[in-house]
Amino acid sequence: MNSYKMVLSSSIEECRKLHDFLSVMAEIEGFSEPFALELELVIKEAFVNAVQHGNAHVQGAVVRLHFKLVIEDGVRTLFVEICDSGPGFSVYEIADPTVPEMLMQPSGRGVFFIRSYADIVRQECDDEGCRLLLRMMPY
């Protein structure tokens, strides 16, 4: 079981550091290029949501990411936890962006992309912030 942790300032400008971190992790773990691209899309969307909605662009806030790769019966599973320090929003109450009345909305697709490539295991929010746990199957 390999584990990776990263703490980023709650700023969209940190996406470059996140990209570099994910690229190195994908190379170390031998993820295929298509999976690495899916992973980056999912994690960047979750990070942006944590910055914008969780931490609400608060100066000094951080986003914590924890990646844990588990191998059980020869099957690799990647668990990713994204933590912010704000009230966040419920990923379970997001409108489907593919329904006709949502097609022209300028936002609301991030969680849709996340769900397209990862399983949302759970979301927990309390006074300390929100934690989103995702599961992906590397190939």
Image (cartoon, rainbow, N blue to C red):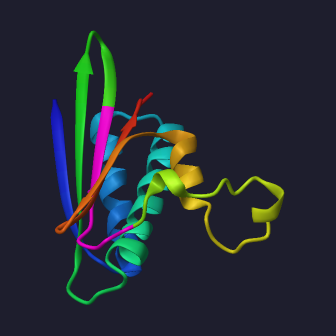
Residue 80 in magenta stretch: yes
Q: Residue furthest right?
A: 100
Residue found at x 27% / y 9%: 73
Query: Which residue lies most toward the bottom here?
Result: 59
Q: Residue furthest top?
A: 73
Is residue 133 visible from the viewing direction of this image? no
Q: Residue at x 16, y 41 (%)?
A: 3
Which residue is nearer to you in this view: 129 or 82?
A: 129
Magenta segment includes 65? no
Vertical order, 97 against 57 (above or below): above
Q: How many marks?
A: 0
Depth check: give the residue in front, 97 or 30.
Answer: 97
Residue at x 48% of width, y 38% of height = 35
Estimate the x, y position of residue 137 in percent, counting from the top left: 41, 29
Describe residue 112's horizontal placement relative to residue 51 as left or right: right
Image quadrant in which the C terminus is located: top left
- In the shown orientation, is residue 17 left or right of residue 105? left
Q: Is 73 placed above or below 39 here? A: above
Per the rendered image, the range of residues in magenta is 78-88
Percent across and percent down for residue 101 are 80, 63
Locate the N terminus and report the quarter of the image it occupies.
top left
Please state the horizontal and vertical placement of residue 85, each as a whole percent of the image: 23, 71
Mark yes or no: residue 42 visible. yes
Q: Where does residue 41 sit, x and y in percent of width and height?
A: 50, 54
